[in-house]
Image (cartoon, rainbow, N blue to C red):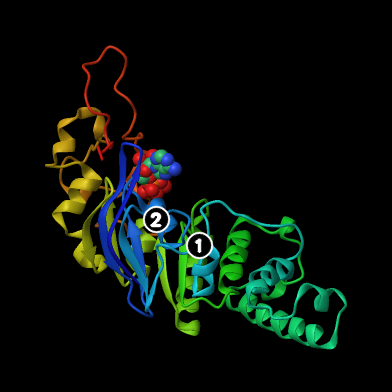
């Protein structure tokens, strides 16, 4: 997938500003950045939920920016969402929903249980079971999703996306809300999915430890712009990334309320949450801990541009 010059404005807010990056076939690519950097907006563009004012998103030979979400999914780009979207029923029922787009038999043939439709359903069910096993849900295939743990429900979401047989899987915060054990397990699953199915993965994630261990390449956004990209090692040493995460030496750092308190001082190597020092599954993006950078100035303070708000 090649993203070039993508620009999205919401009224006066420039949510994405000339963003570009490439997801290579078979790679795990992470999209990171502080809160409000534009990661979700970017995912929405790639999956057709949001149409950019400028720019191009090419997937193989196809231009995606003018296509509706279901057309993009049919081309082989499947996504999960930050918040779990799940229907009632069993794991199998949810995965079969993912197979729906690939089903050829019409509604009538399926409802009448014509032999052709029954055969097709059986094939899809078998494939759904294989995918469930791949993501560690094999033993829970016939369990109602209501009875699953949070981690297993997130796994169902991933499996349902995989049931579309995508060539690119977009994972929006796959380990958000999980404990350490579940995070480690999910990281293993993502790697297994890439290796076994040979697809590419693009993930948005705040868990820096996971990103640095899992991703082949990383793109960093801040204030809607791409500020860095490369391997995890390259990115964690990039001065622009240090500035974005720590506020050191940047013009944003001139605003005292725009920085998180950093008892370790400006030395990024000592910062507990910086990508450079993220060491385990518990390490979280500092943006999660710091206050929203877009908070308006307190009443009575001198007027200034709202932080993080970019004029279009
Ligand atoms: N539909 C919308 N209308 C107006 N502004 C929006 C809309 N969606 C996002 N924004 C704004 O665009 C900017 C980028 O938001 P986005 O959600 O893409 O960031 P993010 O990097 O995903 O943040 P987070 O890590 O908190 O999820 C933010 O300032 C946000 O408030």
- Dot label at residue 207: 2
Check the picture and name the quadrant holding the C terminus. Answer: top left
10 Å neighbourhood of mark 1: few (<14), some, or many (≥20)? some
Q: CA distance from mark 2 to mark 1?
A: 30 Å
Residue 264 vs 178, above or below: the answer is above
Q: Position of residue 11 (x, y in %)?
A: 35, 38
Check the picture and name the quadrant holding the N terminus. Answer: bottom left
Provide the secondary structure element on which disc 1 rests.
Answer: loop
Quarter of the displayed picture in which ligand 1 can be seen: top left
Which residue shows up at 26% across the image and 33% down it?
A: 307
Which residue corresponds to mark 1?
68
Which residue shows up at 58% across the image and 74% down it?
A: 164
10 Å neighbourhood of mark 2: few (<14), some, or many (≥20)? many
**Figure quadrant of residue 275:** bottom left
Which residue shows up at 71% across the image and 60% down it?
A: 145
Q: Is mark 2 within 8 Å of ligand 1?
A: no
Q: Which residue is more in the foreground, 199 or 104? A: 104
Do the CB atoms of the residues marked 2 and 1 lie less than 8 Å apart?
A: no
Which residue shows up at 69% across the image and 66% down it?
A: 94
Q: Position of residue 224 (x, y in %)?
A: 28, 48
Question: N-terminal of the two: label 2 or label 1?
Answer: 1
Q: How many marks?
A: 2
> In the shown orientation, is residue 9 left or right of residue 180?
left
Q: Which residue is more in the foreground, 307 or 191? A: 307
Residue 154 vs 131, above or below: the answer is above
Residue 158 appears in view: yes
Q: Position of residue 149 (x, y in %)?
A: 65, 57
């Amino acid at each position: 997938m090649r993203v070039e010059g993508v620009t999205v404005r919401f009224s006066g807010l420039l949510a994405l500003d000339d963003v570009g990056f490439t997801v290579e076939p078979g790679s795990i690519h992470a999209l990171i950045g502080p809160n409000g950097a534009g990661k979700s907006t970017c995912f929405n563009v790639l999956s057709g939920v949001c149409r950019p004012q400028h720019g191009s998103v090419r997937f193989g030979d196809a231009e995606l920016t003018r296509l509706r979400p279901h057309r993009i999914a049919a081309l082989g780009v499947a996504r999960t969402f930050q918040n779990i979207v799940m229907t009632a029923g069993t794991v199998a029922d949810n995965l079969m929903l993912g197979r729906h787009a690939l089903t050829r038999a019409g509604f009538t043939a399926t409802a009448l249980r014509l032999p052709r439709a029954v055969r097709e359903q059986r094939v899809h069910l078998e494939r759904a079971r294989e995918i469930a096993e791949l993501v560690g849900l094999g033993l829970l295939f016939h369990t109602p999703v209501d009875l699953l743990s949070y981690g297993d429900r997130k796994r169902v979401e991933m499996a349902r996306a995989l049931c579309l047989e995508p060539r690119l899987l977009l994972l929006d915060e796959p380990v958000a809300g999980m404990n350490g054990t579940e995070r480690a397990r999910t990281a293993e699953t993502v790697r297994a999915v890439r290796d076994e199915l040979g697809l590419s993965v693009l993930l948005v994630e705040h868990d820096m430890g996971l990103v640095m261990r899992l991703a082949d390449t990383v793109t960093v956004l801040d204030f809607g712009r791409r500020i860095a990209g490369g391997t995890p090692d390259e990115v964690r040493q990039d001065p622009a990334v240090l500035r974005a995460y720590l506020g050191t030496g940047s013009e944003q750092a001139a605003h005292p309320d725009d920085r998180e308190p950093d008892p370790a001082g400006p030395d990024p190597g000592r910062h507990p949450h910086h990508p450079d020092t993220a060491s385990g599954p518990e390490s979280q993006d500092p943006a999660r801990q710091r206050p929203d950078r877009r908070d308006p100035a307190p009443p009575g303070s001198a007027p200034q541009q709202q932080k993080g708000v970019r004029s279009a």
